[in-house]
Image (cartoon, grey):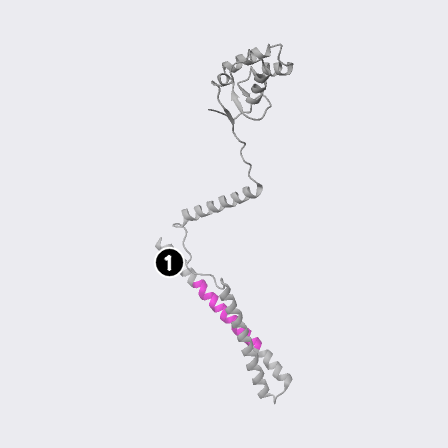
Amino acid sequence: MVSESDNPEQNSSGLIISNDDSIRSFLLSASEDVQLLRELRETALNLSSLNKVPYKSIRQIWVGSLPSIRPDLFRLFSGSEFVFTSPKPREKSEELKARLRQLAERAERDEYRELVKDILPKSSATEPFSSYKDQLGFGLHVVLIMFTGYLVGYLAFRALFNHSTAMSAAGGILGLVCGMLVETLLFIIRSSNHDNKSSATASKQKKNQ
């Protein structure tokens, strides 16, 4: 069998076969047959110069010819081969192209990280409040400190100023502010300790390289 990527020059659909000597001889003789329809004679003449011809047209010319002069159909096609056309490549959609680009970029990043994993120092220390659990715990701790400061200030001023409502509220606000200041100071201390640990870890890794 013959596989062709080009379409036949004859604009026809269906089975395509190769044009060998027996078919070409039949077409030339059919183009000169005056008893054959003019349209079929012109078709036969046009097909005789092609390398591949549609089976349907050859069949029509063969049927239109006189049985006494036309060759046996099996003998006519015995030396020819089927010609198959290659399908057009399937076009990729824009969504698929974008997805493929993302996958390619991700693969490149992973490959780059794999190449430099032994060169860049590994960061063993985690950033403060990097997780949702840490953030929630810090928020609850701040609320607890503020509430405790307000309660202590409120009770202290209530005892000092003979149960005065205004002074008790002022004492509560003062205690709340003091609690916020204490929490801010503790936060600064924790951040400084974390930075010192990170610097020490990075220096140790550089020395080990």
- In the rendered image, residue 184 lying in the magenta stretch gets the answer yes
Compared across the picture, whether 119 is left or right of 67 comes to left
Task: Say what secondary structure mark 1 lies in.
Answer: helix
Q: Position of residue 28 (x, y in %)?
A: 56, 11
Crowding near the residue tagged with mark 1, few <14, some 14–19, many ≥20 C-alpha atoms within 10 Å: few
Q: Is residue 23 above or below residue 137?
A: above
The residue depicted at 43 percent of the width and 46 percent of the height is 111
Residue 22 position, x and y percent, is 50, 14
The image quadrant of residue 200 is bottom left
Q: Nearer the viewer, residue 20 or 59?
A: 59
At a point 57% along the width and 79% down the height, the residue shown is 150
Residue sitting at 50 percent across and 45 percent down?
103
Q: Amino acid under label 1? A: Lys
Number of numbered callouts drawn? 1
* Nearer to us in this view, 49 or 179: 49
Quadrant position of residue 156: bottom right
Reading the image, the residue beneath label 1 is: 204
Q: Is residue 24 above or below residue 182?
A: above
Q: Which range is magenta?
A: 176-196
Q: Is residue 115 above or below residue 16?
A: below
- Residue farthest left in this picture: 208
Residue 192 in picture, x, y percent from top left: 47, 65
Residue 206 horizontal/vertical position (percent): 38, 54
Residue lying furthest bottom in this view?
A: 162
The kind of secondary structure the magenta stretch mainly shows is: helix
Left or right of 176 on screen, residue 134:
left
Residue 202 in magenta?
no
Instruction: Give me the residue at 53% from left, 12% from top.
Output: 25
Height in image: 136 above or below 57?
below
Please identify the residue farthest to the front as the structure is shown.
68
